[in-house]
Every structure is written in structure tokens, then in C-alpha cells.
Image (cartoon, helix red, strand yellow):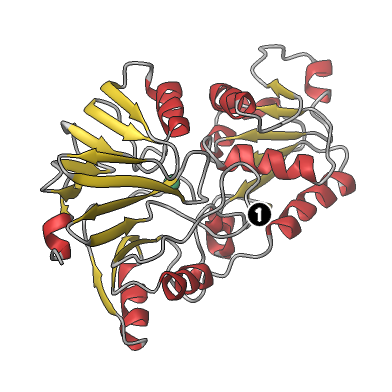
């Protein structure tokens, strides 16, 4: 069997496949050929030559970077295979955001599975993570790879938000959520919990929410909170309502329109009380699009690879855990990493 480091190599530009001559999620400069796991900007950049990705990821990249974000694109559905210079590539659902995929790379009897970002718990806006059998090398993300990170049940966090809306009907609920994935997921969870009031959104969410709706993810009635109407009536209309925007938007002038706001933030990082406090978050909602410690370790046991490679985040803790379990493991120490999704 081929040696793993001959099939995928960590480089400053991202994981590189020498026989296939392509990169996985290259984010340092443009490359000729890229396979992209999902649409977050710390994985998907514009300007590459050829891009291979799930159709939803291509659509998301077009929303964010314009239709000409690459010289050419190729869409690959989950489970469909393609040959790149004799290397077989296919995608399996990663459960992270719409279109997110694990990239499976196979050559000369060796199968390597790159998770991109992933999670295991229920997300009504994307396909559920599927473990890839007979994986020789499993390349796992590690954003929340410390035993202190154990995310609560998502329904519980959504109930806390709805309870706050009931308890404080005179205040606007301003909920920070990253514009791709988290925002749509929070909205969809609210709808599933029976909340059917219109939800106000920041303009930067408009195109992405429209794409989610176009593929059948019902987000209900969304109203753009972009009006320049500064009248008292316009301001009063936000009382008791939920407004969703990227976290930074609530720090600017745009947010001054909301009466007596309660500031919330939906992120896995909200389990760190100090972080919530620093950001002035009154209603921290621990809703993450990444696997927590138990999901990471359970997944490694389930996939049961011959070798674990760890990247994007807390590499050392997961590597150490694996070694204590008698597993071969290595940190990739590949790129400085910037988590967009939390
Ligand atoms: Zn991501």
C-alpha cells in the first residue's frame, strides 16, 4: 500500500496531493486545482483555476465571491466519484453546513478521509455526517478538541432564546450568528420549535438565506432590517422580535435602531463565560457547527483508522488522547487557522 505522506502532504498552502496534483482547501494564494470541503472563508477562497466541490458549496462560493470565483468548476454530489490524474476522489457528508463534505482520496489501495469541519449532532440545514468505512488515514479537525468542550443540547439553547423573548417582550433580541451556516441553522431551529413570527436579518445574510430557501430549507418569513427609517414606529416594530446578524454588525451604527436590545451570540465559544462577558453578550447560546470533545473522540473510535492526522485547532490534545488509546496520530501544524463558524 502507498505511504500516506506520498498521497497527501501538509504544505503552507494546504494539504497537497502530489499524484493528483491538487490541493484540499487551499487558502494561501491561488492554485491550479482545488478540492473544497465547504464554503467558509477559512476553507474556500476565490481565484483558483479548477475547483471541485459539492454543488451547494459551489453555489455558496458564487454567492460570496461572484459567479467567476474560479476559472472552471466541477460539481460532485455525495458518493459520486471522479478521477483526477489517476487519483479517485469522492465526497461524504460532514454535517457542518449546507454542502459541507469530507473529501475521500484513494490511490493504490490507500484511502484517506479529510473531514474539513464537521459535527455529529442534528442540523436541520444539512446532510448528516457519514463515517467513511475502511479509512486508513482519518484527517480530523480539532476546533473544540479539549475535554472541557462539551456542547449542550441545541434544543435546550433554542428554548432559552424563546423563553427570553417571552420574558422580555419589550426588548429586541439581537442574536449574533455567523452569516453562513449558523444563521440559517438558528432560524431553522426556531421554526422547528414553532416560532413563526417574521425574523429580521442583516443584509449580509440575504443571498445566503435565499440560497438555503431555494434548496428547500424553509426559513419562514425573513425581513431585511436595512431600512433607513429612523422613526419611532420603525424602532418600536423591533420590540419582542428576533434580529439575526453577523456578530460584528451589532457593534456598529446599524444596531442603534434596536430598542433595549438583549445581545445574544450563537457559538460554541460561548461555553467560555469569559468570552461572552468580553463581548458584552447577555444571552450566550452554545450552538456549534463543530464537533465537541465527545463527538471528536467517538468519531475517531467509530472510523477506527490505522492513523489519525489532526489539523485546524487543538491538535496536541487530540493527538495525545489518541496515543493514550494506542493509536498512531500526528499533528499537521499546517496553517495558521481562523475559525469562521464557531
Ligand atoms: Zn467551517
Residue 51 rendering spot, x and y as whole percentages = 28, 31
Can residue 231 be seen in the rendering of this structure? yes
For the point 51% across and 57% down, the residue is 119
For the point 11% across and 59% down, the residue is 6
Q: How many other residues sit within 10 Å of disc 1, few (<14), some (14-19) or many (≥20)? A: many
Residue 19 rendering spot, x and y as whole percentages = 11, 47
For the point 24% across and 36% down, the residue is 34
The answer to whether residue 250 is left or right of residue 78 is right
Residue at the spot of label 1: 285
Q: In the displayed structure, would residue 161 be above or below residue 75?
A: below
Can residue 27 be seen in the rendering of this structure? no
The answer to whether residue 130 is left or right of residue 172 is left
The answer to whether residue 50 is left or right of residue 235 is left
Q: Hey, which quadrant is residue 29 in on the image?
A: top left
- Camera-side residue of 246 and 15: 15
Residue 290 rendering spot, x and y as whole percentages = 49, 56
- Camera-side residue of 295 and 153: 295
Residue 300 rendering spot, x and y as whole percentages = 42, 71
- Give the position of the N terminus as an image quadrant: bottom left
For the point 83% across and 24% down, the residue is 236
Q: How many marks?
A: 1
Element at badge 1? strand
Badge 1 residue CB within 8 Å of ligand 1: no
Amino acid at each position: 500500500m502507498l505511504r500516506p505522506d506520498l498521497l497527501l502532504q501538509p504544505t503552507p498552502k494546504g494539504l497537497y496531493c502530489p499524484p493528483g496534483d491538487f490541493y484540499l482547501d487551499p487558502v494561501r494564494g491561488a492554485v491550479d486545482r482545488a478540492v473544497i470541503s465547504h464554503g467558509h472563508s477559512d476553507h474556500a477562497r476565490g481565484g483558483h483555476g479548477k475547483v471541485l466541490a459539492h454543488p451547494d458549496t459551489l453555489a455558496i462560493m458564487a454567492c460570496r465571491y461572484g459567479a467567476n470565483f474560479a476559472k472552471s468548476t466541477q460539481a460532485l454530489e455525495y458518493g459520486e466519484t471522479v478521477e483526477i490524474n489517476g487519483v479517485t476522489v469522492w465526497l461524504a457528508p460532514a454535517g457542518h453546513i449546507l454542502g459541507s463534505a469530507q473529501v475521500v482520496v484513494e490511490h493504490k489501495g490507500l484511502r484517506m478521509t479529510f473531514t474539513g469541519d464537521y459535527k455529529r449532532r442534528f442540523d436541520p440545514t444539512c446532510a448528516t455526517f457519514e463515517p467513511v468505512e475502511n479509512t486508513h488515514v482519518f484527517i480530523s479537525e480539532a476546533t473544540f478538541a479539549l475535554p472541557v468542550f462539551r456542547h449542550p443540547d441545541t434544543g435546550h439553547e433554542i428554548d432559552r432564546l424563546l423563553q427570553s423573548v417571552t420574558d422580555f417582550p419589550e426588548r429586541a433580541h439581537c442574536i449574533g450568528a455567523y452569516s453562513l451556516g449558523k444563521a440559517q441553522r438558528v432560524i431553522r431551529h426556531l421554526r422547528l420549535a414553532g416560532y413563526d413570527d417574521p425574523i429580521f436579518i442583516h443584509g449580509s445574510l440575504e443571498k445566503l438565506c435565499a440560497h438555503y430557501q431555494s434548496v428547500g430549507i424553509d426559513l419562514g418569513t425573513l425581513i431585511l432590517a436595512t431600512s433607513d427609517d429612523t422613526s419611532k414606529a420603525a424602532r418600536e416594530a423591533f420590540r419582542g422580535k428576533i434580529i439575526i446578524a453577523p456578530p460584528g454588525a451589532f457593534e456598529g451604527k446599524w444596531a442603534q435602531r434596536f430598542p433595549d436590545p438583549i445581545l445574544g451570540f450563537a457559538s460554541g465559544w460561548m461555553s467560555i463565560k469569559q468570552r461572552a462577558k468580553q463581548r458584552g453578550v447577555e444571552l450566550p447560546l452554545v450552538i456549534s457547527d463543530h464537533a465537541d470533545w465527545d463527538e471528536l473522540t467517538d468519531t475517531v473510535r467509530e472510523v477506527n483508522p490505522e492513523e489519525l492526522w489532526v489539523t485546524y485547532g487543538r491538535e496536541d490534545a487530540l493527538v495525545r488522547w489518541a496515543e493514550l488509546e494506542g493509536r498512531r496520530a500526528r499533528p499537521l501544524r499546517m496553517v495558521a487557522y481562523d475559525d469562521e463558524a464557531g
